[in-house]
Amino acid sequence: MMDEADIVAAMKGGDAAAVEELVCLYGDRLLRSAYLLCGNEADAQDLVQDTLILAFRNARRFRGKSALYTYLHGILLNLTRHYHRKRKRVVYTDQPPDLASPEPSLSRDPDAAVASSALMDAIQQLSPSHREVIILRYYEGMKIHEIARQIGVTKGTVKSRLHYAVSRLRQLIPEELNLFSANGTYDRRKP
């Protein structure tokens, strides 16, 4: 397996094996983020594929000022924004988006499946800008300044979006599943 510097060098040299390495290293993470950002597994797979193709084609633009994954995720965010703009202009069907979980292992635990489904439904109801910061903060584990740099806004804007996104999630998630509620995971059983 290649390290990050070898992958970048291989990409810049036009070596297709670099794409395979990218898929092995970052494919699952990118797919999870894409799915959370767009809410449809097939579209998420297309977004990840387009991300990897663009990264490979434009490898010479990568200057190494950030981690390779951060660079890839930036491409993914831009493609996802374009995806949402395109979907707002054209209505394809009256069917709601496919919200099936991309993680089949959750189906073995009914409680986890219910919680995951409720969270996914709530996240999909957030505005795209609020959804982005929630995913980058809680799913990607990025720090506030990293999110700000990634999406091109100030740290204050990130904090504000996180605040409003979490407030909205408190309203959207059923009380019995809501870790964002005032009591958090406090045991609500009566004595």
Image (cartoon, rainbow, N blue to C red):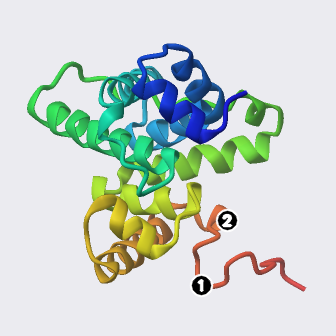
Q: Residue 164, percent across and down? A: 36, 75
State which quadrant residue 171 falls in. Answer: bottom left
What residue is at 64 percent from the left and 46 percent from the top?
Answer: 116
Would you name the residue on which mark 1 appears? Answer: 182
Q: Quadrant of residue 168?
A: bottom left
Q: Is residue 182 above or below residue 134?
A: below
Looking at marks 1 and 2 on the same chain, the residue that comes earlier in the sequence is marked by 2
Residue 54: % across, % down: 32, 27
Question: Which element carries disc 2, helix, strand or loop?
Answer: helix
Quarter assignment of residue 60: top left
Residue at (46% x, 72% y) in the render: 166
Give the image location of residue 183, x and y in percent: 67, 84
Question: Which class describes the residues within 10 Å of circle 2: few (<14), some (14-19), or many (20+)?
Answer: few
The amino acid pointed to by label 1 is Ala
Give 5 or 116, whichever is nearer the viewer.
5
- In the image, 64 versus 27, the foreground residue is 64
Name the residue furthest left.
89
The residue tagged 2 is: 176
- Residue 134 in the figure: left or right of residue 58: right
